[in-house]
Structures are given as structure tokens and as C-alpha cells.
Image (cartoon, helix red, strand yellow):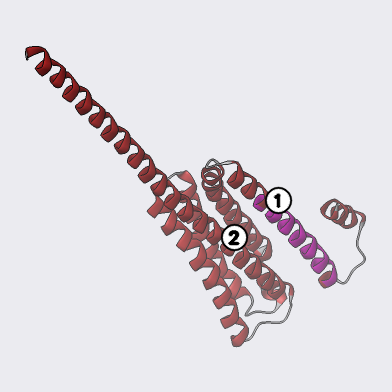
């Protein structure tokens, strides 16, 4: 009788241990699923921010093209044109500011975010000067206003790229497929940027109404190549 109770006790102990092990395994699996779900949601949020970066870049490119053309034009702009310029600038400014807010929400509060905010504010200040310059004839505009305008744009785009870099690395680190997709996206944007540079070079030559010099041709060969 005593031996029977000992076997029964051991059997209950073994079954209880197995149940505890199964519960522990289920808990680990559930935690892993929950962690993956949270990470997938975070990756989706980061990808959405990167989409916003692409939209902001495109908005800045549109603003750059229109405002550069306005500065190249010697005649003053009218009120309707200036309202159009303000609308273009507001679109790009709102796009960049939205990226700042979403990056802060994701918890990415590194130096890249401070750099982006400073570049956006500086570009906003330059735009006010550029808009005022377009109200005057070309001969009465401040010297170097066009180069200051382009510099502020380049600084802002560079800050956007710097902010996008850690986000892209985070997405690429989730797996080989996403890594390859991010690589293709980077190549596509580089081609887009090169095509924009080529278009701007040709546009500047047309507006200058002069025969391209050797330096102009060499620059175009490099860009096209």
C-alpha cells in the first residue's frame, strides 16, 4: 500500500512538472508572438515615415524648381504667383514638420532630428527673403540670394537624408527581403536626384541664353554618365 502511494505521488509529480513546462513553453511562445507583433507594427510605422520622407523630398524639389525659375526671371512676380509660391513652400514645410513629429513619436530623438528641425527653420527664414526678392526687378535683388536659396535647400535635403538613414537601417535589419527593397529604393532615389541635376543644368543653360562652355559640357557629361 505504501509503495502504491509512492508511485502515485511520483506520477502526480511528473504530470505536474510536465504541465508547468508546457505552460512555460506556451508563455515563451506567446511572448515571442507579442514581441514580433510589436516589432511588425513598429516597422510599419517606420516605413510610413520613410514614405513621408520621399513625399517631402518631392515637395522640396518642386519648390526648388519653381522658385529657382522665379529668381532667374528678371521681371517682378505678381500677387497670384507669390500666393502660389507660398502654397508650395507651405506644402514642403508641413511635410518636413510632420516627419519631425512622427520621428519623435517613435522615440528617435537623436542629433539627426535636431539637425532636421534647425535646417527646416533656416530654410523657412530664407524663403521669406526669396519671396520678397521676387517682388523686385532682377537688378534690385540682393546679391547672392539665389545661391543662398539653393544652399538652404541642399542643407535641408541632406538633413532629411541623415534622418532617414537610421530608419532605413532599422527596416533593412528586419530581414533580407526588406534589406533588398531598401537598397532598390535608395538606387531609385539616386537616379531621381541625378536626373533632377541634369534637368537643372540644362534649364540654367537655356535661361542664360549662351553657348555652353567646356566646364558646362564636362558637368553634363559627368551627370549624364
In the image, which disc is placed on residue 7?
A: none
Q: Nearer the viewer, residue 168 or 71?
A: 168
Q: Position of residue 134 (x, y in %)?
A: 64, 77
Q: Secondary structure at mark 2?
A: helix
Compared with 14, 50 (above or below) is: below
Extreme residue toward the left, this view: 1
Who's the residue at 56% across and 51% down the image? 159
Whether 191 is among the magenta residues is: yes
Q: CA distance from mark 1 to mark 2?
A: 13 Å
Whether 25 is among the magenta residues is: no
Extreme residue toward the top, this view: 3
Q: Nearer the viewer, residue 184 or 5?
A: 5
Compared with 31, 202 (above or below) is: below
**Neighbour class for label 1 at 10 Å: few (<14), some, many (≥20)?**
few
Q: Which residue is mark 2?
A: 54
213 left or right, relative to 87 = right
Q: Nearer the viewer, residue 152 or 103?
A: 103
The quadrant of the image that shows the N terminus is top left
Q: Secondary structure at mark 1?
A: helix
**Pointer 1 and pointer 2: residues touching (CB < 8 Å)?**
no
210 left or right, relative to 81 = right
Q: Which residue is mark 1?
A: 187
Counting residues from the start of the chain, the first of labels 1 and 2 encountered is 2
Who's the residue at 46% across and 44% down the image? 111
Q: Position of residue 142 (x, y in %)?
A: 65, 68
136 left or right, relative to 28 = right
Does the image show residue 143? no
160 left or right, relative to 111 = right
Q: Which residues are magenta?
A: 185-206
Q: Main secondary structure of the magenta part?
A: helix
Amino acid at each position: 500500500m505504501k509503495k502504491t502511494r509512492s508511485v502515485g505521488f511520483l506520477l502526480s509529480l511528473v504530470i505536474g512538472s510536465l504541465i508547468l513546462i508546457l505552460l512555460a513553453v506556451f508563455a515563451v511562445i506567446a511572448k515571442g508572438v507579442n514581441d514580433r507583433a510589436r516589432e511588425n507594427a513598429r516597422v510599419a510605422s517606420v516605413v510610413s515615415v520613410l514614405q513621408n520622407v520621399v513625399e517631402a523630398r518631392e515637395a522640396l524639389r518642386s519648390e526648388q524648381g519653381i522658385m529657382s525659375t522665379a529668381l532667374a526671371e528678371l521681371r517682378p512676380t505678381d500677387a497670384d504667383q507669390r500666393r502660389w509660391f507660398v502654397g508650395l513652400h507651405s506644402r514642403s514645410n508641413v511635410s518636413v514638420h510632420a516627419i519631425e513629429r512622427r520621428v519623435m513619436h517613435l522615440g528617435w530623438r537623436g542629433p539627426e532630428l535636431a539637425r532636421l528641425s534647425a535646417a527646416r527653420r533656416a530654410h523657412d527664414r530664407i524663403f521669406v527673403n526669396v519671396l520678397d526678392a521676387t517682388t523686385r526687378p532682377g537688378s534690385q535683388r540682393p546679391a547672392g540670394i539665389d545661391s543662398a536659396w539653393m544652399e538652404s535647400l541642399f542643407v535641408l535635403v541632406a538633413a532629411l537624408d541623415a534622418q532617414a538613414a537610421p530608419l532605413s537601417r532599422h527596416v533593412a535589419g528586419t530581414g533580407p527581403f526588406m534589406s533588398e527593397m531598401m537598397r532598390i529604393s535608395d538606387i531609385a532615389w539616386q537616379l531621381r536626384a541625378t536626373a533632377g541635376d541634369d534637368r537643372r543644368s540644362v534649364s540654367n543653360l537655356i535661361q542664360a541664353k549662351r553657348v555652353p562652355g567646356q566646364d558646362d559640357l564636362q558637368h553634363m557629361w559627368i551627370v549624364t554618365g
